[in-house]
Image: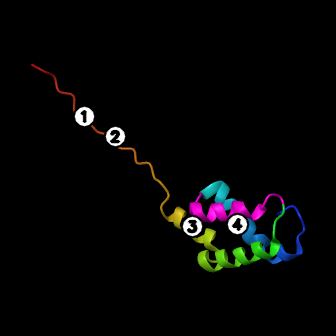
Amino acid sequence: MLEQNIPQLQNWHSFIIMLKEDIQDYGTLPEYTLKTIADWNNNDKPNFTHITKELEKLSRTLGKDYLNKVKFSLKVYEPQIIVAIENQIKRDIL
């Protein structure tokens, strides 16, 4: 869909790119949403009016910039590695 210039989806281009990035890199979308998106192809006969309505629903539910919020929350919880070195005193055994 992104490669094609589909007039009905022109306004949704950036949101579709965000969905694609989420699916490929973050995996935050529920399985039901993924199944819904997979059904958009409709056996190689996509109904762009239906897809537009689904994009509107997703945008209302998730928010237009939902992935930016996810990315920000991941930065807040960046994993950190802590290396601890224990000092041991060597004692001579008498």
User: What kind of element bears circle 2?
Assistant: loop
> Which percent across, then down, holds residue 3?
86, 61
Q: Is residue 82 above or below residue 64?
A: above
Disc 3 or 1, which lies upstream in sequence? Answer: 3
Name the chief secondary structure element in magenta.
helix
74 displayed left or right of 8 = left
Helix, strand or loop under label 4: helix
Circles 2 and 4: CB atoms closer than 8 Å: no
Query: In the rendered image, which residue does mark 3 sit on?
Result: 70
Secondary structure of the residue carrying numbered label 3: helix
The residue under label 1 is: 88
Q: Quadrant of residue 45?
A: bottom right
CA–CA distance in space, label 3 to label 2: 35 Å
Which residue in the structure is indicated by mark 2? Answer: 85
Residue 64 image position (x, y, % from top left): 66, 77
Rendered image quadrant of residue 48: bottom right
Q: CA distance from mark 3 to mark 4?
A: 11 Å
The one of 25 and 84 positioned closer to us in this rendering: 25
Q: Position of residue 61 (x, y in %)?
A: 60, 77
Q: CA distance from mark 4 to mark 1?
A: 53 Å
For the residues labelled 3 and 1, the Cα–Cα distance comes to: 44 Å
Residue shown at 59%/64% (left/top)?
32
Q: Nearer the viewer, residue 14 or 44?
A: 44
The numbered dot on residue 74 is none
Residue type beneath disc 4 = Met
Q: CA distance from mark 2 to mark 1?
A: 9 Å
Please tell me which residue is depicted at 63% across the width and 80% down the height of the picture: 60
Pick out the residue farthest to the top.
94
- State the separation of the CA atoms marked 2 and 4: 43 Å
Q: Which residues are magenta?
A: 27-44
Mark 4 — residue? 18
| Residue at the spot 13% in from the left edge and 21% down from the top edge | 93
